[in-house]
Amino acid sequence: MKQLQKWQILKSALVFDHKWYKLRRDEVRLPNGALIDDYFVSVRAEVAIVFPVTQEGEVIMVRQYKHGAQEILLEFPGGVFNSDREPAEEAAMRELQEETGYTSTQITRLSTVFDNPTKDTNRIHFFLAQNVEKLYDQHLDSTEDIVIEKVRLEQIPGKISSGEICVAGSIAISFLALQHLQQITIK
């Protein structure tokens, strides 16, 4: 089997540094010796997403406007966090509570995946929260306007097939959570 090699970073500089976005420019040497002097990488925060299920089999979802897509989308509670200051599980539960008012003590890590490893630095951490209960009011950021929707567990695959759930992270966590809950079999 061919031995793969990493690219060698010759120079790296942050060319844009804002609280909402950071962009790094790398000069790299490829394994074949070729040079790329302007490979741009988005330096992004980690993301935690949670699939919350009530004891009655209702999945708690959020519908909100996403400006990049310029669409109002149905997805799972989650958000960015600083992994140097907060563990992913705590971030997931914080986001669940802030966005929905729901909480749980039964949390399972489903997976951690790279978001877009070609151009972004971050990973997405997926969690299943079972037997969630609404104990709090929503505590939204000034940029958030969120409507909570309860969806029956068995309706999730149909909402993906119909395109109603169309955010990549929400689709990925759905399949991981449904497999964990033995609602579907992935082979």
Image: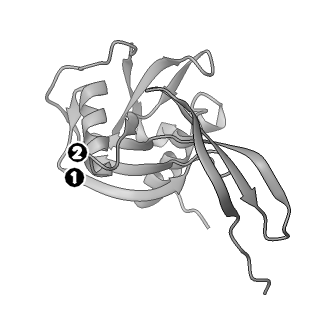
Q: Name the residue under label 2.
A: 131
Asked where in the image residue 134 lies, by quadrant, the reply is: top left
Which amino acid type is marked by label 2?
A: Asn
Q: Residue at x 44, y 59 (%)?
A: 111
Q: Give the answer, above or below, for where 2 lies relative to 18.
A: below
Label 2, label 1: how far apart the Cα atoms are = 7 Å
Which of these two is toward me, 12 or 173? 12
Q: Mark 1 points at which residue?
A: 106
N-term mark: 2 or 1: 1
Q: Which residue is drawn at 48% across and 48% down?
A: 173
Say few, some or many: other residues with alpha carbon within 10 Å of mark 1 (under 14 / 14 to 19 / 20 or more): few
Work out whether residue 157 can be spotted.
no
The C terminus lies in quadrant: bottom right
Which amino acid type is marked by label 1?
A: Gln
Say few, some or many: other residues with alpha carbon within 10 Å of mark 2 (under 14 / 14 to 19 / 20 or more): some
Q: Which residue lies furthest to the left in this view?
A: 135
